[in-house]
Image (cartoon, rainbow, N blue to C red):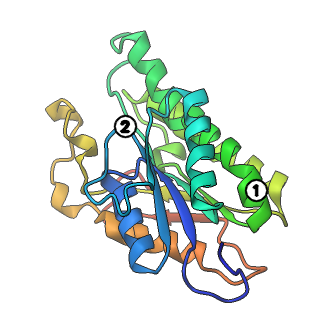
């Protein structure tokens, strides 16, 4: 477990959605910083380390997610941090998005976030560890044709701020608010819902560096909220 009195490595960090996109970038950053990443995802990561630091789970299944978190934490000997990077979207007008698809966005992005944190809390309380939740600029600013995503990410913002008040002095809590990134997040969308020029979006590695910044603050100092976006971000402020 991490000695929280001055070490710069992030320790043992569980990352949901750690097999791709931002989650995979965070996993790489944790490993390069001398930490031990644990991955929760539906898909096996390309680099699975020792083969024991991965659990296959759909975070929409909240009870299965809680079991997977506990199993990984027990296998690793505890946790120093969790980062809830798992997330999906389903664009379209409310009347046009099938109810099961709409519900699944909220289940993954909001309920899955809460499930990961809930199961991790006993371990984080022991290590005086850290929670980083991943919201979005669309958790602060609403747009059309994104009711499920905005509802879920607005929920993550409220959940995290309430959690920070609840755990103050016991577990560190950071709300990460990333803008658009160059990942596969937009790959399965209709053309009208894709960025016109993905080259202007942020590299996920830039956001991962911000995660490490939050995880390696000295005792008594917390980064409570981080907005990390490309200079051309249109959804912020």
Q: Nearer the viewer, residue 66 or 167?
A: 66
Q: Position of residue 88 (x, y in %)?
A: 38, 36
Residue 66's x, y, as percent? 62, 37
* Residue 18 percent coordinates (x, y): 40, 52
- Image quadrant holding the N terminus, namely bottom right
Residue 192 in the image: above or below residue 177: above
Which quadrant of the structure image shows residue 70? top right
Q: Earlier in the sequence, mark 1 or mark 2?
A: 2
CB contact under 8 Å: marks 1 and 2: no
Q: Residue at x 67, y 65 (%)?
A: 224
Q: Give the quadrant of residue 55.
A: top left
Q: Distance from label 1 to label 2 (Cα)? A: 28 Å
Which residue is painted at 53% across and 44% down in the image?
A: 139
Can the viewer see residue 196 in this picture? yes
* Eye-nearest disc, 1 or 2: 2
Q: Height in image: 209 above or below 84?
A: below
Q: Secondary structure at mark 1?
A: helix
What numbered label is drawn on residue 164? 1
| Mark 2 burial class by Cα count in 10 Å: few <14, some 14-19, many 20+ | some
Which labelled disc corresponds to residue 42? 2
* Closer to the camera in the image, 46 or 104: 46
- Front in this rendered view, residue 50 or 67: 50
Above or below, 175 against 192 in this view is below
Q: Pointer 1: residues within 10 angstroms few (<14), some, or many (20+)? A: some
Q: Secondary structure at mark 2?
A: loop
Q: Is residue 120 left or right of residue 55?
A: right
Q: What residue is rendered at 16% in x and 48% in y?
A: 196
């Amino acid at each position: 477990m991490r000695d929280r009195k001055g070490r710069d490595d992030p320790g043992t960090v569980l990352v949901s959605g750690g097999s791709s996109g931002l989650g995979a970038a965070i996993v790489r950053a944790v490993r390069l910083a001398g930490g031990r990443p644990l991955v929760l995802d539906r898909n096996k990561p390309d680099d699975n380390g020792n083969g024991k630091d991965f659990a296959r789970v759909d975070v929409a299944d909240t009870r299965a997610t809680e079991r997977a978190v506990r199993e990984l934490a027990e296998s690793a000997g505890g946790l120093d941090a969790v980062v809830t990077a798992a997330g999906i979207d389903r664009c379209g007008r409310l009347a046009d998005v099938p109810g099961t698809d709409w519900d699944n966005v909220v289940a993954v992005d909001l309920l899955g976030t809460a499930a990961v944190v809930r199961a991790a809390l006993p371990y984080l309380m022991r290590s005086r560890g850290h929670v980083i939740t991943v919201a979005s600029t669309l958790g602060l600013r609403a747009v059309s044709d994104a009711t499920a995503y905005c509802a879920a990410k607005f929920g993550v913002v409220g959940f995290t701020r309430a959690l920070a008040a609840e755990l103050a002095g016991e577990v560190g809590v950071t709300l990460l608010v990333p803008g658009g990134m160059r990942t596969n997040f937009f790959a399965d969308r209709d053309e009208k819902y894709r960025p016109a020029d993905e080259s202007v979006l942020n590299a996920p590695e830039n956001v991962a560096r911000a995660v490490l910044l939050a995880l390696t603050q000295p005792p008594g100092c917390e980064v409570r909220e981080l907005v990390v976006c490309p200079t051309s971000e249109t959804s912020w402020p």
